[in-house]
Amino acid sequence: MAQIPVGIIMHGVTGRMGKNQHLIRSIVQIREQGGVLLANGDRLMPDPILIGRNEEKIAALAQAHGIARWGTNVDEALANPHDIIFFDATTTQARPALLKKAIAHGKHVYSEKPVALGLEEALDLYHVAREKGVCHGVVQDKLWLPGLQKLRLLNEAGFFGKVLSVRGEFGYWVFEGNLQPTQRPSWNYRSDEGGGIILDMICHWRYVIDNLFGEIKSLSCIGATHIPMRWDEQQKPYQATADDAVYATFELHNGAIVQINSSWCVRVRRDDLVTFQVDGVNGSAVAGLTDCYTQAAVNTPKPVWNPDVRQTHNFFNDWATVPDTQVYDNAFKVQWELFLRHVWGEGDYRWGLLEGAKGLQLVDLALKSWHERRWVDVPALEG
């Protein structure tokens, strides 16, 4: 049983997502557990090199997590044949050129989403990777969240019967930055810097809907910039030009209707920062990031509408908790392990650049629907 080092160029891991989810909770954890186990007993051991523009930050991050290799030169890293995987978590604008360069060096590529700013650019990336014959993956982490895994289990078990509708609520209040420090970087609210909640979240909802509920037939979408003035990291006011909320309705080929609201201008009064309610003929379920609650048809109460009397029935008590019957690992880590095995020729992997392009297709169509104020069809996207 051998331990096989796998060189990984990790680009852009000083940012929140790259550092916390991809480096600390994925690659560092995989290293600490002794690597990724293969079917023959061998283990793939990630050997990352951290690449970033700020030498001081990247050196401190590497030292803090026991990473021996780091640097500031992407081209030098790409020239090293030891490093066979290139991962990017930097800005969306720079991502297509970086991924293309990595592919040209024969690197397998793994990327945060969105992989580009639009569908045409995303499809071009997919075709370049396919022609070069490299493995490719796009982060679709929400598929491995415990709450959504439980929804999948219920669906596969036939709990819902015919699914009628899905209602998703995502978001929280992001402080404007004047009275309290904001929780998100200012570029999120500048359209010329790749900001906007439609670009950020519709990509997620594409793969969630496709994998859990069915193929999308058409959509209707309206976006908004509810808060036009925000304050940046230096507490200087700036004009917000990107959308900070989106309200979308999707018609599926199987007849189900999916409604998802995404907003950075909403105060949370629900079980979690994101919740999905699935209503079927035989039962319903509500899932958050971790927990999932069900109500079967035979356990459904009979409410009485009387607006003149205070409601005394506690509807939350009518729902049963789906138990944790397994240990759920970090969603980002699970996908990293699947991708590493795939690079080594073990296991199918379908969350590649074409799936990333589907997310950008839905983004483009959502923007089209908003700007033209109409329903638009979602054609099949073939490679």
Image (spheres, rainbow, N blue to C red):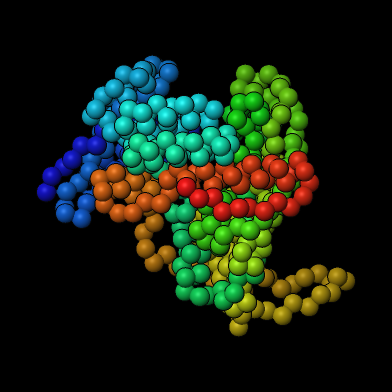
What is the x, y in percent for residue 289?
A: 52, 54
Is residue 77 something that shows in the picture?
yes
Viewer-side residue, 279 vs 296: 279
Residue at x 81% of width, y 75% of height = 305
> To which quarter of the image does residue 347 belong?
bottom left
Q: How many marks?
A: 0
Check the image and name the residue furthest to the front.
Answer: 131
Residue at x 74% of width, y 72% of height = 312
Tell whether 164 sits left or right of 47. right
Residue at x 52% of width, y 75% of height = 159
Check the image and name the residue furthest to the right.
Answer: 308
* 80 to 114, vertically: above or below: above
> To which quarter of the image does residue 327 belong?
bottom left
What is the x, y in percent for residue 174?
A: 65, 37
* 189 to 262, vertically: above or below: above
Residue at x 71% of width, y 43% of height = 368
What is the x, y in percent for residue 23?
A: 37, 36
Viewer-side residue, 215 vs 222: 215
Is residue 272 something that shows in the picture?
no
Tell whether 211 sits left or right of 27. right
What is the x, y in percent for residue 57?
A: 41, 20
Check the image and name the residue furthest to the bottom.
Answer: 298
Viewer-side residue, 147 vs 221: 221
Tell whether 159 sits left or right of 337. right
Check the image and name the residue furthest to the left.
Answer: 1
> To which quarter of the image does residue 69 belong?
top left
